[in-house]
Image (cartoon, grey):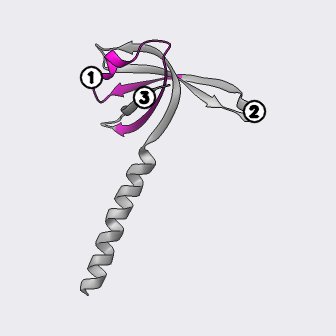
Amino acid sequence: MRAVEVVLAVATVMAAISSQALAERIVIGVVVKVDGVAGTISVREMHLGAAGAISYGKVEEFKAQDGLLFDAVRSGDEVVFSASEMNGAMTITKLSEQ
C-alpha cells in the first residue's frame, strides 16, 4: 500500500511540473512600447520562416514580473523572453536582449 501512495505522489508532482512547463511560452520579438505606469511591455512577435525569412505577428502586451525590466529595454530593441500566465495575464519572467 505504501508503494502505491509513493507512486501516486510522484505522478501528481510530475503532472504539476509538466502543466507549468506547458504554460510557459518563449517569445522572440521587437519591443514596441514600454509603459512603466501600466506595468506592461508591448512586443511585436517575430516568426522565423524557411530559408531565414522573418515575418512579424501582432503586437501583444505583457506584464513585467520585475520592475527593473522597464529600465532594461527600449522601443525597437529585439528581445527573447519567457512568459507565463500569472493572475490571468501573460507575464514576462525572464528576458534577454538580442
Residue extending furthest toward the front: 98
Q: Quadrant of the N terminus?
A: bottom left
Q: Is residue 8 magenta?
A: no
Q: Is residue 26 above or below residue 58?
A: below
Residue shown at 42% from the left, 28% from the top: 96
Residue shown at 36% from the left, 56% from the top: 17
Q: Is residue 73 left or right of residue 76?
A: left
* Residue 52 picture quarter: top right
Q: Where is residue 76 drawn, in percent x and y?
A: 50, 13
Instruction: For marks 2 and 1, give the one nearer the viewer.
Output: 2
Residue shown at 41% from the left, 56% from the top: 18
Disc 2 to disc 3, C-alpha distance:
25 Å
Task: Tell me the number on the disc at residue 51.
Answer: 2
Q: Amino acid at mark 3?
A: Ser
Pick whichever, 54 or 24, lies toward us. Answer: 54
Q: Quick one: label 2, few (<14), some, or many (20+) residues within 10 Å?
A: few
Q: Quick one: label 3, few (<14), some, or many (20+) residues within 10 Å?
A: few
State the residue position of label 3. 96
The magenta region covers 59-85
Q: Is residue 83 magenta?
A: yes
Disc 2 to disc 1, C-alpha distance:
37 Å
Q: Quick one: label 1, few (<14), some, or many (20+) residues within 10 Å?
A: few
Task: Tell me the number on the disc at residue 18.
Answer: none
Q: Is residue 45 above or below residue 16?
A: above
Q: Of the two numbered discs 2 and 3 on the same chain, state the one appearing first in sequence.
A: 2
Q: Amino acid at mark 1?
A: Gly
State the residue position of label 1. 67
Q: Where is residue 48 drawn, in percent x and y?
A: 65, 32
Q: Where is residue 91 drawn, in percent x and y?
A: 36, 32
Q: Secondary structure at mark 2?
A: helix
Disc 3 to disc 1, C-alpha distance:
15 Å
